[in-house]
Image: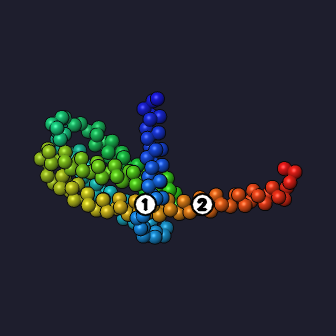
Amino acid sequence: MTIRTLKTLLTSSSLLGCFLVAVSSPVRAESFTPAKLRQFLSQYEKSLDSVASGYDQILNQTLPLRGPVGNVIGRIPFERRRARLGKLRKTIRKLETRPDDLVLALTLQNQTEALLDDVENISQIAFDNDYEEAGMQLSRLQIPLGHDEQIIERYTYQLARTAQMNLRKFRSQPHKTLQSFVRSHPEG
């Protein structure tokens, strides 16, 4: 099994797991209209500018940076995180145009969770390297980003519940339709 296949399998499994948890979770979600969602996503995307600014402050510092265990860190881990931030922005824009897309909502939820991990990690690296200002800027973002993650999670639960109800309706309808088709076409 290749690494790519394994990653695809793990991503699919985590998406399915998120869907199953979302469907069975008793969390109450605020009802989002497409307009409310667009407004939230617009504000969320603007808040990512602060994250990008924090990343830039770290990248503009003299390298090499040291990691939490003293290992030397180059620019590549930061560039990867910046690229993930760009992907997150693209997901936000796609979800703005397709607000009922459960897969996009789950993708945004996963990317936001990864962003929180990245922000925490990079702020710690900044502190470890005596770049207090950048570390503080990123640390202050963790609580608002965590709140945004909870909102995205509740929206995803809302979409999953709607998808589950639609699936139940769909499952009940084909049997009736198939039975009426068989009765009207007995030779089939």
Name above or below for residue 61 compared with residue 39. above
Report the residue at 30% width, 59% height from top.
Answer: 146
Q: Secondary structure at mark 1?
A: loop
Identify the mark at residue 155; answer none if there is no mark. none
Report the residue at 21% width, 56% height from top.
Answer: 139
Q: Nearer the viewer, residue 164 or 152?
A: 164
Residue 115 x, y percent position in the rendering: 32, 51
Q: Secondary structure at mark 2?
A: helix
Is tag 2's residue or tag 1's residue first in the polypeptide sequence? 1
Q: Amino acid at mark 1?
A: Ser
Q: Nearer the viewer, residue 49 or 156?
A: 156
Identify the mark at residue 168; answer none if there is no mark. 2
Residue 31 x, y percent position in the rendering: 46, 70
- Left or right: where 24 falls relative to 75: right
Cα separation between marks 2 and 1: 17 Å
Q: Amino acid at mark 2?
A: Arg
Estimate how packed mark 1 is, as few (under 14), some (14 to 19) or many (20 or more) residues with alpha carbons within 10 Å.
Answer: few
Q: Is residue 168 visible?
A: yes
Report the residue at 15% width, 36% height from top.
Answer: 70
- Left or right: where 170 falls relative to 159: right
Name above or below for residue 97 compared with residue 62. below
Report the residue at 32% width, 45% height from top.
Answer: 81
Q: Nearer the viewer, residue 140 or 151?
A: 151
Residue 59 x, y percent position in the rendering: 23, 44
The quarter holding residue 147 reads: bottom left
Residue 55 x, y percent position in the rendering: 26, 49
Number of numbered discs:
2
Residue beneath disc 1: 25
